[in-house]
Image (tube, rainbow, N blue to C red):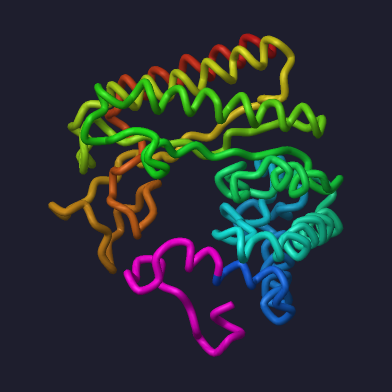
Amino acid sequence: LYWVNGGRYIDMNDPAHPWPAFADATAAFYANAPAQALYRDYIRAVVTRTNSVTGRAYADDPTIMAWQLANEPRPGGSDAVAVPNLPAFYDWVDGTARYIKALDGNHLVCTGSEGLKGSIEREQVVLAAHRSPAIDYLTAHIWPNNWSWMDAANLPGTYNAGAAKVADYISTHVRLAKTLGKPLVIEEFGYPRDGAAAYDPTVTTVFKDRFYRQIYAAIEADAAAGGPLAGSNFWAWNGEARTPHADHRFRRGDLNYMGDPPHEPQGWYGVFDNDATTLAVIRAHAAALAGARG
């Protein structure tokens, strides 16, 4: 929208424009023809690209699992904006997915939706957004801290309440996936280290590990039962990267790139290469799924 409306935008961190002003403003994207034209130009450039290192076209690359329409697309933030915008949103999902399929018939296509949290908390919106035959599977994101399901400053006292909401969120999306007869991927989930503002890789991850085990146990149980839960992606891999700044904020010119995006504290949710207990949980889950699927 910024590129077609004269450079106007909403700063989501501006106190004068509290949430959901940002989500409501950006929802105009779906019905904006000039913005959609730019968007499709971008899609075509990426999907039809040939890897300059391997010489293999992306459309023929088996290391790519799927194309995603956007990161966490929402029809709007408030009911007042989102509800009348739903037809445009659904048309955008279906039309864009079909466009990608026309460019690349070899790969899966998904929405990138958070699930209920990105669908004004309405199950019918999740179902309608994923009903298109060009959408191959459902997605869900799970962010207990961002959604205030627990208190990072009091994890011992609030973890269980948050875990109950996580379990309910997963079971709801499994049910929705069964309704549509499509797989479900928990493609984003994250949890802070032990304590508020605990970003340093030396801080323990006791509750983070518990959260990961909960997600993985749900996937393993559903897979064993022949359910739709097909896999997950944790957020995110920080590896060897370390911030040089005491405030854990990314600055222009920094080259220690992490999975944590630059607008968030570096180390907030990412997994570092020295997070031995978290890595053990991830490895155990990978082994369990590999064993279950032969």
> Which residue is drawn at the image coordinates 53% and 63% (left, top)?
23
Identified at 73% across, 31% down, the residue is 177
Q: How many marks?
A: 0
Instruction: Point out residue 265 in the picture as x, y percentages from the top left corner.
Output: 28, 51
Q: Kindly report the secondary structure that dominates the magenta region of the rendered protein.
A: loop
**155 or 241: nearer the eye?**
155
Q: Is residue 105 located in the magenta-colored stretch of the structure?
A: no
Query: Could you say which is closer to the camera, residue 118 or residue 242?
Result: 118
Q: Residue furthest front?
A: 80
Q: Which residue corresponds to the image point at 59% horizontal and 38% vertical from the top-left?
A: 140
Residue 235: image location, x then y, percent: 44, 39
Q: Residue at x 50, y 37 (%)?
A: 142
What range is drawn magenta here? 1-24
User: Residue extending furthest left?
Assistant: 246
Residue 48 against residue 148 in the figure, above or below: below
> Would residue 15 be counted in the magenta stretch?
yes
- Quarter of the rendering occupied by the C terminus: top right
